[in-house]
Amino acid sequence: MDLLTDRTGRRITLRPVDDDNWRAVADIAPRDEQRAFVAALAARYLLLSMRGGVWTSLGIFADDTVVGHVMWAYDEEDGTHWVGGVIVDADEQGKGVGRQAMTALIRMLSGRPDCREIRLSHHPRNTGAAKLYSALGFTPTGTFEDDETVVGLLVRQSPAV
């Protein structure tokens, strides 16, 4: 499988949040103007992962430096995997980190035998996110989660019965 690198040549990987990196992940903050769409700090998403029992948080690394956060969950009711809490630190944006992190997550989730569709939601005014997700193959499902547009990426078709 191809290595994922950002525009500066750093290797982009997703790693579990652990005792050594949780503080750096918690401190990840978006640009001020993005706070209408995502939490002010990744710490909020870490708490959702720790306390909610649904989400799994991952740190986004550029080489060995934490540069972002993403989380995922599996919905047993409809068999979809969900992506949430995607934040790339303000100073790291514009380098291709978000695209490569999403590509890594899509690869990871697609490798799970129970993965047939990946979904996420984004605010309609978050045009940067909409453009990225569309470029990665996500298409609108026609549904909404609160005030956010739900998009999906089919990974594999269910076998015909």
Image: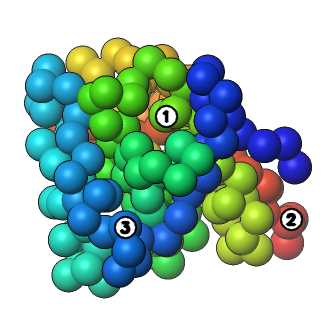
Mark 2 belongs to which amino acid?
A: Ala
Helix, strand or loop at mark 2: loop
* Separation of residues labelled 1 and 2 (CA atoms): 35 Å
* Pointer 1 residue: 98
Q: Position of residue 131 (x, y in %)?
A: 48, 18
Answer whether labels 1 and 2 touch (C-beta < 8 Å): no
Label 1 – label 3 distance at C-alpha? 19 Å
Residue 149 visible, this angle:
no
* Image mark for residue 21: 3
| Residue 146 or residue 16, whichever sits in front | 16
User: For mark 3, does the 10 Å Cα neighbourhood hold few (<14), some (14 to 19), or many (20 or more) residues?
Assistant: some
Picture quarter with the C terminus: bottom right
Give the class, few, some or many, for how many residues have Cα within 10 Å of label 2's Cα (few <14, many ≥20). few
Q: Which residue is mark 2?
A: 160
- The answer to which of marks 1 and 2 sits earlier in the sequence is 1
Q: Earlier in the sequence, mark 1 or mark 3?
A: 3
Q: Which mark is residue 127?
A: none
Q: Nearer the viewer, mark 2 or mark 3?
A: 3
Please name the residue shown 21% across and 52% down the image: 27
**Of the residues shown, which amino acid type is indicated by label 3?**
Asn
Measure the alpha-carbon separation of dots 2 and 3: 44 Å
Question: Measured along the vertical axis of the image, is residue 75 above or below residue 144?
Answer: below
Labels 2 and 3: the sequence-earlier one: 3
Q: Are marks 1 and 3 in contact (CB under 8 Å)?
A: no
Q: Secondary structure at mark 1?
A: helix
Number of the front mark, 1 or 3? 3
